[in-house]
Every structure is written in structure tokens, then in C-alpha cells.
Amino acid sequence: IAYEYKPKETDIVELACDVATYGGDATVICKRKGFKGEILEVIKKCDSMYIAERLAYYNAIYHPQAVKVDGVGNGEGVCSRLFQLEVPCVPVIGQAKAFDEEHFVNLRAEMHWHMRTLLQRGWIDLPDDIDLINEMGCIKFSDNPGKIQIESKREIRKRIGKSPDYTDAFIYLFSDAGSPYTIGGLL
């Protein structure tokens, strides 16, 4: 997280959002330009339409190539509204098949591993945010019959007392979903 990336004019701009509505979790909206990520907004206790409005607002300001949104649960409604507004929404489904099915149990595991690799190589610049740092440091990987797997959100919540909202938003932000490059092309 100590790496400092200076964005270039030609760098890709993308937004991402981990959606939470009225529970104890937070909606986290973040942006990246190239390999520099930042938190734009953290929202607690709101409805899906408000979250879609906020993403449409940031879309109008930053003109991202993609707006990656948690596409299940409450995020499904956010994605539907963004499609209506013609925002370039990419629903992210963590339980979907991994691009590299030989090595990963699902897309969620692949996205987390990809982020881990980017961080280890010092290729991305993340905000110095205590919630993000604490969450990223607590994610556990396991080897499930020769494939990499991430512990379930239920297990994470039980262990740290909350959902990893910040981590999920940044995992989506730097994932392959909606990007013009492939994981293999980056690593």
C-alpha cells in the first residue's frame, strides 16, 4: 500500500461498488485511474436507488470505461437501474466460474488472488485507509482439491465482526471484469 502511482492521462478509469443497504454493512464506492485507487464515498443505511444515483453521478464526472458492481443481492437492483440509465455497468458475480478454472474455485477466489499478486509486486497504489488495510490483511486463502479458495463471507464476518466491504469494492475495482486486459496479460 506504500507504492505511489502517478496516473497518466491515457490510463483506464473504472469505478467499483460493494453494495449494502439497511443492515450494518457499508456501501463502498471507489475509483481507479491506472493503478491508483481511491475511495470516493462510503454510505450506510440507504436504498438501492440512492446507490445507483450516486454511481450515475460519479459516472458523469469521471466517464469510466466500466462501473463494476456487486451483482447479487441488493446489488442486482443497483445494476438494473444503472442499465436503465445507460451507465456502463459490469455486474460482478463472485460465485461465477473463474476465468482460470484449473487453479481457482470461483471468480471471487481468482479476483482476490489477482489483488494479492498486484500488491505483492507493488503494482497498485491503494489509499492509506485503516478499514481497507485491516480487511485486506485478514482474508484467508485455502487449497480446495488443488484449487485456490477464499473463506466465505460468513466466516469472515464471524471472525472480524463485519463484512469486508472495502476489500470487496477494491477487489472488483482491480479485477479483470470489464477491463481491456487479461489477468495473464498483467502478470
Image (tube, rainbow, N blue to C red):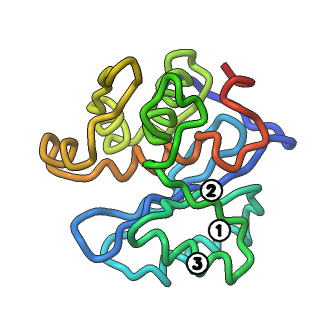
Q: Which mark is residue 17?
A: none
Of callouts 2 and 1, the N-terminal one: 2
Image quadrant containing the C terminus: top right
Q: Quadrant of residue 129?
A: top left
Q: Which residue is located at x 66 percent, y 34 percent?
A: 35
Q: Which residue is located at x 49 percent, y 84 percent?
A: 49
Q: Secondary structure at mark 3?
A: helix
In the rendered view, does 136 fall on the left or right side of 53? left
In the rendered view, does 161 fall on the left or right side of 153? left
Instruction: Check disc 2 and report the residue beneath it.
Output: 15
Q: Secondary structure at mark 2?
A: strand
Name the amino acid, label 1. Tyr
> Between tags 2 and 1, which lies in front?
2
- For the residues labelled 1 and 3, the Cα–Cα distance comes to 17 Å
Contact between labelled residues 2 and 3, with CB atoms less than 8 Å apart: no
Name the amino acid, label 3. Ser
Few, some or many C-alpha atoms within 10 Å of disc 3 (few <14, some 14-19, many ≥20)?
Answer: some
Contact between labelled residues 1 and 2, with CB atoms less than 8 Å apart: yes
Instruction: Check disc 1 and report the residue beneath it.
Output: 58
- For the residues labelled 3 and 2, the Cα–Cα distance comes to 16 Å
Few, some or many C-alpha atoms within 10 Å of disc 2 (few <14, some 14-19, many ≥20)?
Answer: many
Vertical side of 162 occupied by 186: above or below:
above
